[in-house]
Amino acid sequence: MAKTSLPPVSWEAEEYIVRDHDVIWYIGLFIVAIALGALAVLYQGWTFLTLIILSVITILVSNLRPPRKIRYTLDNKGLKEGTRLHKYDEFRAFGILKEGNHYSAVLIPKKRFGLSVKIYFPEGSGEAIVDNLGNRLPMEEVKLDVLDKIVNFLRI
């Protein structure tokens, strides 16, 4: 599908968007966890209680861990994400999302239940990235799905 050979494009970006959490957010998290935990104990839902505890621990650990900087490269072989290579033939299209001040390219898989790949990039590199991807994949409009909207709303 490649029309012409473009020079490789490389950039560094964080693996996810850092969302600020104030004390009120953490208090809200613990209030919701305690309320759900109380319901789990009241109805003797021990598995649900375990799920709540593990979820809160996971949210806290992921929020306290800073995102890694990942080196991305788009070349003739595909997208290199660190040391991992995603070949273009794994994807049927790509789209661009803007979330606040952050831009990302979403690579849409060919397989029905395949996972999409979302890569963040600085605004200054956007044109070269879109040109490089557009040279190999068709561009489609992409929107945040319901889960992404919930995550953005909860600032997780």
Image (cartoon, rainbow, N blue to C red):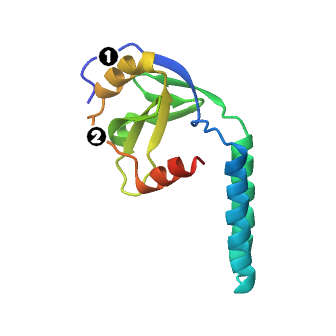
User: Does residue 139 appear anywhere in the picture?
Assistant: yes
Q: Residue furthest top?
A: 7
Q: Which residue is mark 1?
A: 5
Q: Amino acid at mark 2?
A: Glu
What kind of residue is marked 1? Ser
Q: On the image, which quarter does residue 48 sit in? A: bottom right
Instruction: Point out the frontmost of discs 1 and 2.
Output: 2
Residues at discs 1 and 2 in contact (Cβ within 8 Å): no
Instruction: Tell me residue 92's x, y (percent).
Output: 31, 42
Could you say which quadrant of the image residue 129 lies in?
A: top left
Secondary structure beneath dot 2 equals loop
Work out whether residue 90 can be spotted.
Answer: no
Q: Quadrant of the N terminus?
A: top left
Does 92 sit above or below residue 7? below
At x 73% / y 39%, what residue is drawn? 65
**In the shown orientation, is residue 147 left or right of residue 42?**
left
Q: Nearer the viewer, residue 63 or 3?
A: 63
| Label 1 crowd bin: few (<14), some (14–19), many (20+), radius 10 Å | few
Q: Is residue 81 left or right of residue 115?
A: right
Residue 11 placement (x, y as % from top left): 52, 19
Give the residue at mark 2: 141
Q: Residue at x 34, y 15 (%)?
A: 6
Q: CA distance from mark 1 to mark 2?
A: 25 Å
Neighbour tally class for label 2: few under 14, some 14-19, many 20 plus, Cα within 10 Å: few
Give the side of residue 78 with respect to residue 3, left or right.
right
